[in-house]
Amino acid sequence: MARSILHTIESNMSGFSKGQKRIAGYILENYDKAAFMTASKLGHLVGVSESTVVRFASELGYDGYPSMQRALQEMIRSRLTSTQRIQAAGDMLSGHDVLSAVVQSDMEKLRLMVGEADRSAFDRVVDKIMSARHVYILGVRSSSFVAGYLNFYLHLLFENVTLVQSNAAGEIFEQLFRIGPGDVMIAISFPRYSKITMNTVKFARDRGAGIIAITDNALSPVYQMADDALLAPCEMLSFVDSMVAPLSLINALLIAVGARMGTDASRTFAELEDIWNAYGVFGKMDDE
């Protein structure tokens, strides 16, 4: 519905009440700003009540104003430049406690992820990681830090893990030229979707590797190319991509893999603790 919301508004314009037409007209002309406004502020701008705005969202088929707002945000987030994102977010954050606004937004995305998570897909992904001949982890731009986090822990658990470095396209394909059937690529991609990620996933898929996508929704390019996908909303907050929900999803994935390994995971970390202690990797509270 995210891509068609403007078309839906235009198609239903003749059936709207006078107040709803004012809301519709404002959204059609200023959807990038409306996406970050509360129902109260949008109503105030166009001269209608907050309840009229909420009923307008229901008229479009949404279960509430927040759902319509998310649809607008999903539609624009891959189109806006960083400068436009800062300007659009100004309406959401202006005059508010920024700390509370950002944390509340992250908490909402975590609740959304838990409520909509596909548990069977999650279990299949754990199975595929456990049985893979080799696991390749891909993430570029802001997603590279999420990929690095996943790699840090998976690399402790398994020998057959490679973090694909994305400094140059040619180097990526050199790292992947041995990829093939029996291997798995975990592709992490969030708006604004990187063409490097899309091309790399296509290469791995064409070579016969299985593709696991960690992305934000079913419209994501990597979702369309994946055998399995885990979804987590990535909130657009001004120029920042909030990765709280994706990181929480990855925490769950790592813990599930560790639990599936059982005593093997325990032995691995017992040996690592011996090495860390022997070489003083971690300081103690009483160290000066």
Image (cartoon, helix red, strand yellow):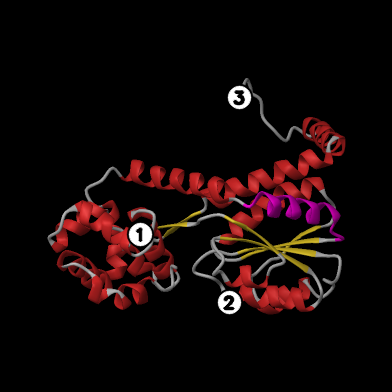
Q: Quadrant of residue 9?
A: bottom left
Q: Which residues are magenta?
A: 118-133
Q: Nearer the N terminus, badge 2 or badge 1? A: 1
Dominant secondary structure, magenta = helix
Which of 180 and 224 lies nearest the eye of the viewer?
A: 224
- Looking at the picture, how far across and down is residue 28, in whole percent? 27, 74
Residue carrying label 3: 288
Residue on which the image places disc 2: 195
Residue 124 in magenta stretch: yes
Q: How many marks?
A: 3
Check disc 3: other Cα within 10 Å, few if <14, some if 14-19, many if 20+. Answer: few
Tag 2 secondary structure: helix
Compared to residue 165, the image places residue 40 above or below, namely above
Q: Position of residue 30 (x, y in %)?
A: 26, 71
Q: Is residue 61 left or right of residue 28?
A: right
Q: Position of residue 202 (x, y in %)?
A: 70, 77
Q: Quadrant of residue 204?
A: bottom right
Whether residue 222 is situated above or below residue 49 in the rendered picture? below
* Amino acid type, mark 1: Gln
Most extreme residue toward the top is: 286
Q: What label does residue 69 carry, if any?
A: 1
Which residue shows up at 82% across the image and 71% down it? 179
The amino acid type of the residue labelled 2 equals Lys
